[in-house]
Amino acid sequence: MPAILIKKTAEEPGAASLAVTVPVEQVREAEDRATSAYQRRARLPGFRKGKAPAAIVKKHFADDIRQEALQELIRESWKVAVEQESLKPIADPHIHNLKWDVGAPVTFEFHVEVKPDIKLGRLGGFQLKRTVRPVTDEQVAAQLNEVRAQKAPWTPVVGEHPRSADLVRVTIAAREGAQLKDPQPYQLVLGEGRAIPEVEQQIYGMLPEETIDAIVRFPDDFPDEAKRGQTRDIRLTLHEVKRQQLPELDDAFAREVGDFDSLDALKRGIREDLAQDAEREADAKVRAELIEQIVAANRVVAPQPLVERALWVFAQAYGIPEDRMSQFAAEFRPVAEAQVRRDLVLDYVVEHEKLQATEAELDERIRQLAERRGMPPEQLYASLEKAKRLRDVERSLTEEKVFAFLLSQSTVEQA
């Protein structure tokens, strides 16, 4: 039987295009298999389950059978393409220019992002400086105030104008003459920039349960370009004002926060947490500097197909709408390029130094995480797997091994 024909039609760093031709014989066999599958489970009037003739089943489920056969042919063609061309895909391929006429071969194109072959001639011999910022009393005090604010209850304010940091509940409606349109409720903390400045200024001058009519202007830097500089007639109702009552900073407060005997113990705990944050920040900066030096020494280039994919992933993560994608891509392109270069370097080291995290190492990390959370390891494993975060843990382990190797090849000065 003739084999599936794969021909590479285009290639660039990070991407490849392949023309695929599936012979008529294989197309027919795939259709027959799909028909048999539907025949076994089909329920048609006048026939017992699985007993309807193939011709009737094929006529009744023509579109479904065709789709199932096509999916099988694409899967089989992709396996052949990956093996024949030694591809290292980073995602599923895109299908283009599909043609399937009756009695003719199926033809289409695979467009796929692939991991480019790079060679890193220098991985070590770099000079790095690791600086751990000291924890100051001001930082401890600021963190303590954040904890204090988190524990502070919100209490209603009566007969007073709201102040900055107050929580307000308002309704804003557009006015068109005597008509009100689209009233919307909002809850926000004044001073956090969640409302346009002129709306906040109006709220500051109101009392709870008061309603006013006003004309407000959108600022020139408003995110929605269409509204910049525009004015709106609005009706604004202030329903409620709440203010936080900060608790006293004393030993009782420390005991309420957690397992602390005194306020001094709480402060020591905060200082220790900040010190650990400073250590992690110092490690992250050293790693970033090391990657930058490796990239510069080896002239690593970020292939544009991989940059575009990284931008798409960032946009999905940040929930960027389609109409803002161009602006987002322009602003985030340097970030995406840096991410791609970083991934290329790390993947190269993983592959050439055989540093992929093992199952035993993953099991041990899951055990450690489960112990900290006070839960059985198998429960955490199942939870991570269900949330599709198990790969994140594995990747984190692998990166730790990679950076341990890379840092051992260079000199790190402790500042």
Image: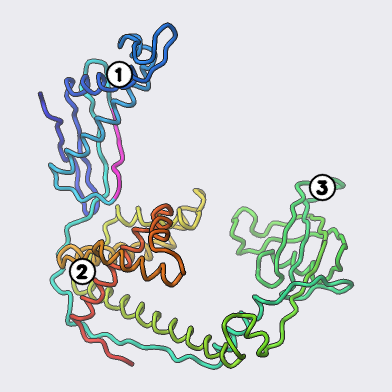
Q: Residues within 10 Å of mark 1 (few under 14, many from 20)?
A: many
Q: Residues within 10 Å of mark 3 (few under 14, many from 20)?
A: some
Whether residue 156 appears in this view of the structure is yes
Extent of the magenta region: 91-98
Does residue 97 show up magenta in the picture? yes
Select label 1 or label 2 by which is in front.
Answer: 1
State the residue in front, 9 or 184.
184
Disc nearer the start of the sequence (1/2):
1
Side of 16 where 189 appears, left or right: right
Classify mark 3: helix, strand or loop.
strand
Disc 1 from disc 2: Cα separation: 54 Å
Residue 197 location, quadrant: bottom right
Residue 138 vs 107, above or below: the answer is below
State the residue in front, 50 or 6.
50
Residue 161 vs 386, above or below: the answer is below
Question: Where does residue 114 sit, x and y in percent of width and height?
Answer: 24, 51
State the residue in front, 390 or 64.
390
Select label 1 or label 3 by which is in front.
Answer: 1
Does residue 58 show up magenta in the picture? no
Residue occupied by mark 2: 299
Disc nearer the start of the sequence (1/3):
1
Give the colouring mode of the picture: rainbow
Residue type at numbered disc 1: Thr
Classify mark 1: helix, strand or loop.
helix
Disc 2 from disc 3: Cα separation: 61 Å
Q: Residue furthest front?
A: 376
Q: Which mark is residue 35?
A: 1
Residue 156 location, quadrant: bottom right
